Amino acid sequence: MRIFQVIKAATNSSVPGNQTWYRNLYEPLIDMGCEVFLFPANDGWEAMYRKDKQLKAKFSQRLIDTFIKEHEKAPFDVFFSYIMDGIVEPAIM
């Protein structure tokens, strides 16, 4: 199974080395034999925290462009994300 995954590795940026989402949402899929294309959501979360519409739009465009490019290489079976409308433009969801 080929998965396009959009997550931020850390659940709490104030805890150094925090990798909770990476370890619980990414690594188990790899362990099960899935092919996972990991698209880091850090810029999207930063846009939400800063309420920066330009950064949000830039992240959204990079997300959709990357998905299309990678999907053309080999189709994805699943789009798996942990994002909110504050992170991406609602039009791409």
Image (cartoon, helix red, strand yellow):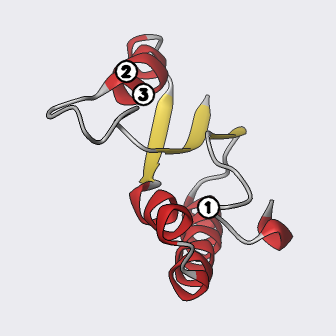
Place of residue 53 in the rendered image (x, y in percent of width and height, measured from the top left): 61, 83
Residue placed furthest toward the right? 91
Camera-side residue of 67 and 74 = 67
Q: Which mark is residue 87?
A: 1
Camera-side residue of 35 and 17 = 17
Which residue is at 37% across, 29% downward?
A: 22
Closer mark to the observer between disc 1 and disc 3? 1
Q: Residue 91, located in which quarter of the rendered image?
A: bottom right
Which residue in the protein does label 2 denote?
A: 27
Marks 1 and 3, Cα distance to the nearest angstrom? 16 Å
Mark 3 nearby-residue class (10 Å; few <14, some 14–19, many ≥20): some
Q: Secondary structure at mark 1?
A: loop
Place of residue 20 in the rendered image (x, y in percent of width and height, measured from the top left): 35, 23
Which residue in the protein does label 3 denote?
A: 21
Which residue is at 43% across, 64% downward?
A: 46
Residue type beneath disc 3: Trp
Residue placed furthest toward the left? 16
First in sequence: mark 1 vs mark 2? 2
Residue type beneath disc 1: Ile
Q: In the displayed structure, would residue 42 be above or below residue 21?
A: below
